[in-house]
Image: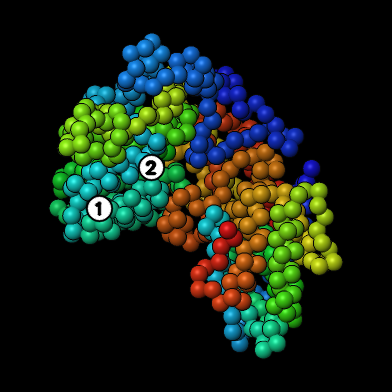
Amino acid sequence: MFSLGDLYKQVIIDHTKSPRNFGKLEPCNHDAEGYNPLCGDQLHVYLQINDSDIIEGITFEGQGCSISTASASLMTEGLKGKSIANFEILFEAFHKMATADLSDQPNQDVLGKLAVLAGVKEFPSRIKCATLCWHTVKSAIQDADKTARTE
Amino acid sequence: MNIEQIRSDFPILDQELYGKPLVYLDNAATTQKPQCVIDAVRSYYEKDNSNIHRGVHTLSERATAAYEASRETIRSFFNAKSTKEVIFTRGATESINLIASSWGRANITKGDEILITHMEHHSNIVPWQMLCEHTGAVLKVVPMNEAGELDMNAFTSLLSERTKLFGVVHMSNALGTINPIETMIKQAHAVGAVVLVDGAQAAAHMAVDVQALDVDFYVTSAHKMYGPTGVGVLIAKEVLLEAMPPYQGGGDMILMVTFEKTQYNDLPHKFEAGTPNIAGVIGFGEAIKYIQSIGLDKIAVREKVLLDYATSQAELFEGLRQIGTARDKACVLSFVLKGVHPHDLGTILDREAVAIRAGHHCAMPVMQFYKVPATARASFSIYNTEAEVDALFAALSKARDMFA
């Protein structure tokens, strides 16, 4: 049985209490709003993507639970300096990890530090908290006008 | 009142989650069901299942009798004048939509005002917004103070001859506030408004006499009063119901149908189109009898003791901010905890087998008022104990320590 400690790992508590890359980004050429109507989690992501499709800068703002804040914080760390193509790979890997069967191990090679969030799959009502920021970045990259949702 | 005896009436309570005894403190969302309600629903399906109001066979007659007996039980519980005033619906939400749709479209025109309050559940906001959009009427809102009490001076000044309907929640699901509906009904009537009271949260906790209150529309849901989900009631004055057009068309609500014209059925059937939730209504009646067997006066006293105990614990708990501290409140402890988001609290408490609600409680304007995205809410019922309150606070300590 998964325990609370599998979800609220020390890394997650740490990122909750002192989120990295928190605040507006200057300059910023892509941004998007994400909202989880169930929880009221709301976040805004800012990206600076250069001509070679590299994410040069990424920050976020907003309010949410521990899982959504830590996930966004870890995501910004993971995506800084990565290409859009790389984002797509990470997005898929993260999504797979969050919704995988309980027995599946996360793809540590691809996900690296992000694998710390693998525990959410045991907490179905919290999966969206972890994935919201990823959907929001996807919206920002696609310059979607609509607020990102996790559906 | 023997709490152990009451607890034994609710089979669901006797279970463990994650190796700990279940502590169910989400009663404002829905209450658990006593064995007698479960048995009534089961027995209906096992012995009497049949469609009502049409069959001449024995099962249909039994089903009809049981369904209509529930209507009488509910009439008597709320002291409605007659069973013609008792309309079964899918719940409080549908009851309000019925009023907004049927009474609203017949009576509301451009420039009219609908007055509601800041602490309404979405179900008593959105139907009126929809009606206003459709008719050009204006939605006005009675403000509240920091304690979560309605501003009665503002209420008085918002009332005018333009006010056609005043809708108010009897007891707030998000705050626990009990509103002074008696006074408010009188004041609203004085300007000619009709009054709708949303009793979804209140009806299991305090006696309601619709005639004494002189309330025009009173709505509630069975599942918050130990009954099944998917069934509720609209209790309304006959004179209003007679004048209102049907809400939905279909079977059971007609006397005579030709392609040229349909003659509608008499009350209350005019508002009950289609085969209703027969088992649900029967279970609802049984739930009311269960409440009556304990007595609402005793329930109110016991629940007050429990709320006072929980409140005193909350006041001592470092970092806890109560949301909703009205002088007159019942059964709801809504709060935020410094450093721990309500959703994390919900998850952490769940692993301690303590079930609470975390979220906006379908009352987003209340969250906006307190500038919080969500609250954690423990809500109590007759089967809850002081030991369960202790379990709640022990679990909260654990959550606080995790984020310390």
Q: Quadrant of the C terminus of chain B?
A: bottom right
- The local secondary structure at tag 1 comes to strand
The chain identifier of the residue carrying mark 2 reads B
Q: In the image, which is nearer the foreground, mark 1 or mark 2?
A: 2
Q: Quadrant of residue A24?
A: bottom right
Q: Residue at x 49, y 39 (%)?
A: B28
Q: Where is residue B90 in the image (x, y as percent from the top left)?
A: 40, 36
Q: Where is residue B219 in the image (x, y as percent from the top left)?
A: 34, 37
Image point (72%, 52%), residue name: A121
Q: What residue type is labelled 2?
A: Thr
Report whether B194 appears left or right of B375. Answer: left
Q: Is residue B101 above or below residue B286?
A: below
Residue A88 falls in image quadrant: bottom right
Q: Which of A104 and B13 is in front in this view?
A: A104
Q: Nearer the viewer, residue A25 or B392?
A: A25
Residue occupying image coordinates x 50% and y 53%: B360
In the displayed orientation, state which residue is furthest to the top.
B58
| Of B161 and B122, the residue lying toward us | B122
Q: Which residue does the numbered mark 2 point to in the structure image?
A: B93
Residue wearing tag 1: B114
What is the chain identity of the residue bearing mark 1?
B
Residue B222 seen from this side: yes
Q: Position of residue B299 (x, y in %)?
A: 46, 27
The picture places residue A38, in percent across and down from the top left corner, at: 54, 54
A136 to the left or right of A123 = left
Disc 1 crowd rating (10 Å Cα; few below 14, some 14-19, many 20+) is many
